[in-house]
Image (cartoon, grey):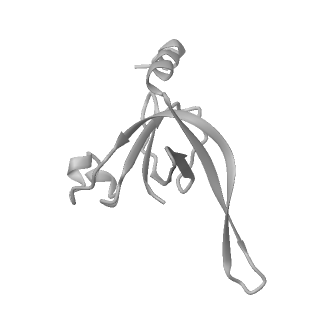
Amino acid sequence: MLLPESFNTAIASVFYDKSFSISRKTRSKDAEGGVVIALTLVGTFNGNVQNSVSTGTRKSLGIEVRGLVDSLTLTVTTSRENDIRVDDELEYSGKKYTVKASPPRDSHLLLVCETA
């Protein structure tokens, strides 16, 4: 079922109430051949947050098929129009999280994160 844009706008205005900053990692080599990772702030977005406590089982998080690790600590839903990629670093409420997966959804973008 294709949802009208007005539906997505209504959902965003009600549920996406938490502010995040997005930092993107760039990798380069130094003079000695070592990898240097730099973080660059690329923007902000609003999303909905669900904290997940690791229980030692992937099934309790509802993602056992995806093969993710049990150290999951945060899931975020936001508009599909946001440019957020796996390995980006998000900052929310003074804590930093790394995006580990973004399973496809029909009406929103789901970000699966763990502490950075």
Report how many numbered discs are placed on residues in the image: 0
Residue 26 location in percent, x, y? 68, 62
92 or 78: which is nearer to us? 92
107 or 32: which is nearer to us? 32
Residue 52 location in percent, x, y? 31, 47
At horizontal 45% and vertical 27% (from top left) the residue drawn is 107
Position of residue 53 in the picture relative to residue 8 (left or right): left
At horizontal 39% and vertical 47% (from top left) the residue drawn is 74
Position of residue 38 in the picture relative to residue 15 (left or right): right
Q: In the displayed structure, would residue 10 be above or below residue 113?
A: above
View extreme (right): residue: 31
Image quadrant occupied by the N terminus: top left
Residue 69 location in percent, x, y? 33, 61
At horizontal 54% and vertical 48% (from top left) the residue drawn is 91
82 or 55: which is nearer to us? 55
Residue 80 location in percent, x, y? 53, 33
Residue 20, located in which quarter of the rendered image? top right
Q: In the displayed structure, would residue 7 be above or below residue 63?
A: above
View extreme (bottom): residue: 32
At horizontal 28% and vertical 51% (from top left) the residue drawn is 53
Position of residue 31 in the picture relative to residue 100 (left or right): right
